[in-house]
Amino acid sequence: MNGSVTLRTPTDVLAAVPYLLGFHPTDSVVVVGLYGRQVVFNVRADLPAPGVPPDEVALLADDMARVLAGHRADRALVVGYGSPAQVTRSVFAVRDALTRDRVAVIEMLRVSDDRYWSYMCASPDCCAPDGTPFDTSGTEIAAAATFAGRVVLPDRTSLTGVVAPPDELALVAIERATTQAAAELARELADGPAAGAARQRAAMRVYRTGLERHRHGSRLDDEELARLTLLIRTVDARDAVWERILAAGTNLDAHVDLWRDVVRRARPDLAVAPAALLAFTAWRSGDGSLAWCAVQRALTEDPGYSLAHLVGEALVRALPPTALDRLSPRPRRVRRRRVRTG
């Protein structure tokens, strides 16, 4: 989703949230951060269990507010999905934390069974005590997302599956393609002083091809994809691609689509660099949920991979995406935090 669609009503907000997250949230508190009229970031967390003490709810709220403030949000929409007691204490704690960080809360909603309740509307004329039924299918948001080919997954577990490794026949096919691509690259790229530059050029050729394919509804074939994963194993080739992502600004849809496809289809041991680049690209485009899934996939394959740690650290520190514009990957460790942006 981008900033071109206006959120005019609670139904518009509820239509937008699943597309922003990539899945339908349940038992969750979601905060959508705005700067002016543009959505700049969103953060989701599981609702605290009923027995969790108030100070832990407050800590969760503080973490969520810090994430939004770190992305320069000046206004926020807070939506809770679940039972009244759990949602109410969570959204009010988030509201208080956002207010302390000088982020104005412009709407607070609770959602359950295709009805919503607004905490900021006391009029029974527009906000009935038994909730307001809503249907997002006819909204401008849904129409725009459908036109753009956006798909909403049923839950967060399904989002994790988006970056899962290939299985069975797909795995056999990519292993065969990788063996063939490795033999071809060995013939094409001779050792010597110019080998690094040649590898970078070769990686960029495949990357540009992949972007064009995804812009026109296609994708790399198995051998092309295997070739790309082999080339970006080296840091110099990977960083050449990273610089291209930085140069693309915020128009990153094709980049995200490409890396998501590469991660899903790559031979598992070669998915580390693509997953880290997907994490960076998703984070830079405001998709914290996918960014976290990609960080976790990269670290599953290689727990010490520095770029994945760098993006993970940026996520937990709520740094703006521009914070890494002038940095190179350096080994860092992701600290465990209470909140994940997905």
Image (spheres, grey):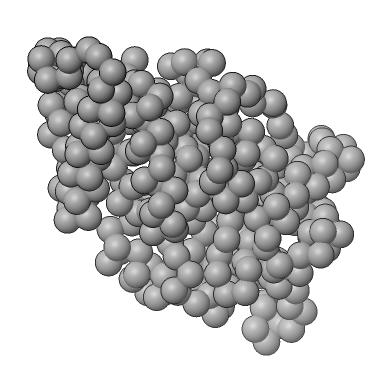
Is 237 left or right of 129, judged from the image as shown?
Answer: left
The answer to whether 157 is drawn above or below residue 67 in the figure is above
Which residue is found at the position 28% from the left and 28% from the top? Answer: 197
Figure quadrant of the C terminus: top right
Q: Is residue 331 in view?
A: yes
- Where's residue 105, x and y in %? 74, 68
Q: Which residue ends up furthest to the bottom in the rendered image?
A: 125
Residue toward you, 29 or 296: 296
- Where's residue 54, x and y in %? 88, 42
Is 249 left or right of 260, judged from the image as shown?
Answer: right
- Where's residue 112, x and y in %? 59, 57
Residue toward you, 63 or 95: 63
- Give the tally of numbered discs: 0
Figure quadrant of the N terminus: bottom left
- Where's residue 276, x and y in %? 45, 31
Q: Is residue 31 in view?
A: no
Residue toward you, 302 or 151: 302
Query: Quarter of the image holding residue 250?
Result: bottom left
Query: Quarter of the image holding residue 176?
Result: top left
Which residue is found at the position 27% from the left and 66% from the top? Answer: 147
Residue toward you, 236 or 162: 236
Q: Which residue ends up furthest to the front in the rendered image?
A: 193
The answer to whether 276 is drawn above or below residue 244 in the figure is above
